[in-house]
Image (tube, rainbow, N blue to C red):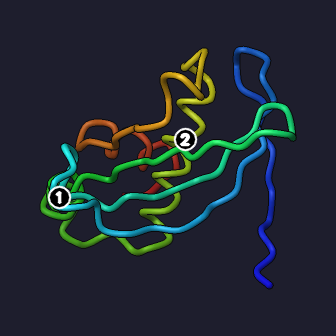
Amino acid sequence: MNLRRVKAYTGNQGYVYEYYFVGKRPALPGDSESPATEFVFDVSTDRKTKFAVSIFLLAEAVKSWGATHGRGLSDAEQYGAVKMRLFQAFDEVEDMRGEGRRLKLDAVMLEEVLARLGIE
């Protein structure tokens, strides 16, 4: 049996989100965000219903960051950036279930979130 570590985050709009990381996979070839890595989280705002949130870390963003900084991103750094993108959505998207289930992390946003984390 695989136990999930449920975490909580209070967004700027007052919602308390519970979430956990489900996993990651390459985005499907026909997906509009492909090529990317899709990180999937299960999210709840009421402890009763869950919905999936996919964050697509675009391959071109990772490549661009690596070219600018002279090194690749570790798996932990990628996960940290994706989690920061999730928190940003929790803070900014009023209806996560309706409007925040497919998020992308492009080159500009990747640079911003990694800088906030102190990753150079």
Residue in the image at 39% along x and 74% along y: 74
Report crowding for label 1: few under 14, some 14 to 19, many 20 or more residues within 10 A (C-alpha). some
Q: Which residue is mark 1?
A: 35
The quadrant of the picture occupied by the C terminus is bottom left
Task: Give the percent coordinates (x, y) of residue 2.
Answer: 76, 80
Using the image, tell me which numbered label, if any, was put on residue 86: 2
Residue in the image at 18% along x and 68% along y: 70
Report crowding for label 2: few under 14, some 14 to 19, many 20 or more residues within 10 A (C-alpha). many
On the rendered structure, is 105 left or right of 83? left
Which picture quadrant has residue 21? Answer: bottom right
In the image, residue 21 sits, relative to residue 47, either above or below, namely below
Which picture quadrant has residue 50? Answer: top right
On the rendered structure, is 26 left or right of 117? left
Instruction: Out of 63 and 92, give the one closest to the viewer.
Output: 92
Identity, as a three-letter code, of the amino acid under mark 1: Pro
Instruction: Out of 101 and 66, give the one closest to the viewer.
Output: 101
Judged from this view, the residue extending furthest toward the bottom is 1
